[in-house]
Image (spheres, rainbow, N blue to C red):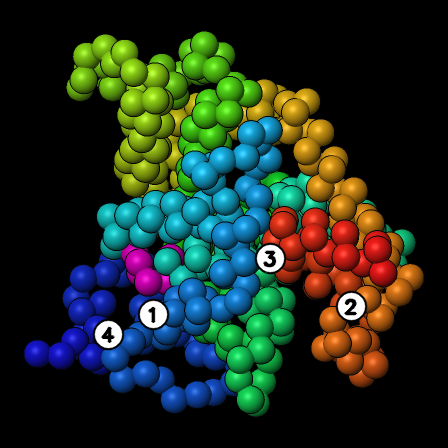
Amino acid sequence: MIFDRDKQFELEDQFLASYAVKSKNSKGRKHPESEDFMRTPFQKDRDRIIHSRSFRRLKMKTQVFVAHHGDHYRTRLTHTLEATQISRDIARSLGLNEDLAEAVTLAHDLGHTPFGHAGEEALNELLKPFELSFEHNEQSRRIVEELEQVYPDFHGLNLTHEVRQGLMKHQTPWDQKNNHFEGASLEAQVVNLSDEIAYNNHDVDDGLRSGLITENQLQNLPIWQAATEKVTQTYGEIKDQTIHRARTVSKMIGLMIQDLIEASNPEKNLICFSPQVATWNKELKDFLADNFYFHPEVLALSKRGQQIIQDLFANYHQSPNHLPKEDQQAISTGVPLEIVIKDYIAGMTDEFAEAERERITSL
Ligand code: MG
């Protein structure tokens, strides 16, 4: 038996909850196209995102700077994969459309600049004098609607309305605008909180690995206490620090996922933590901000990244001929110089940005 698209539509009707977004009800794509005989529209979107150039560049973009570079720290790519795993688990448990949640999560960070949020802030500041701004959600939308160019007749990936909506509704405390979360699909809300669960927990893991934060500091946090208690119940006392860290972080993720599944009220269009875990999560976030994201060593590296972005912007602005040929062409067809520079810098990986500064300043 072949589980073609129509069969999958049938299975969705059978197995998804009434409040899930059904693939067969998708509002479709901006540029009409014939649909696949095997895949649902959201599965098709997922594949387009994974095969895009912007997705591949996530592997070399910083999530949080850590003083000691190493093979085991998260990048935007591994963050994206972890967040996707969490959103799929939650979507499945709530009877939501796992394919939609997967596609939105895979694309949710495509618009990030090099050098993490420090890079985003720097680029935003540089654009202000030109009455422009930079915001990574808006840039994710721009990437999938404009900048990816893989079709002869139109720009962008021509994703479904639902996936594009999910990207716009994606909102984290870092986000500066688009404060309208109302009307977001349940799947998009799941993505939003899965992103938080992923980064809060892996930042604890990376923070501990780097030595910039310690387990002692975490001991006052109720979420850490609850997780260590469960770990001790299961394994007894774990002497090896690396194993203890791994089990505790894993347990924190599990606690948050389970709480979210139990506390959410999909009938009322609400995906949320219980009040207790929401407070624990907020305390964890505040802890990470104070002790990790604003750690002097992290700040020094953030500043360095910002300087690279400032140097690149100033150089291209003064000498647009340092931009790639296709960008120079875009300028000649009327795209404003600052927008071309913004898109080019935003798309860079950390390493490329650094190498590019070397190259253009020695021209
Ligand atoms: Mg994210």
The amino acid on which the numbered mark 4 sits, given as a three-letter code, is Phe
Please tell me which of labels 3 and 4 falls first in the chain.
4
Residue at position x 25%, y 58% in the image: 17
The disc at residue 323 is 2
Asked where in the image residue 334 lies, by quadrant, the reply is bottom right
Residue for badge 4: 9
Residue for badge 3: 111
- Would you say the residues marked 2 and 4 are in contact, meaning their CB atoms lie under 8 Å apart? no
Pair 3/4: label in front: 3
Residue for badge 1: 43
Please tell me which of labels 4 and 1 falls first in the chain.
4
Element type at mark 2: loop
Magenta segment boundaries in residue numbering: 96-101
Residue toward you, 186 or 193: 193
Prevailing secondary structure class for the magenta stretch in the rendered image:
helix
Pair 2/4: label in front: 2
Residue toward you, 328 or 156: 328
Q: Position of residue 171 (x, y in %)?
A: 55, 48
Cα–Cα gap, marks 1 and 2: 36 Å
Residue at position x 65%, y 44% in the image: 115
Q: Is residue 71 left or right of residue 37?
A: right
Please tell me which of labels 1 and 3 falls first in the chain.
1
Pair 1/2: label in front: 2
Residue at position x 70%, y 53% in the image: 355
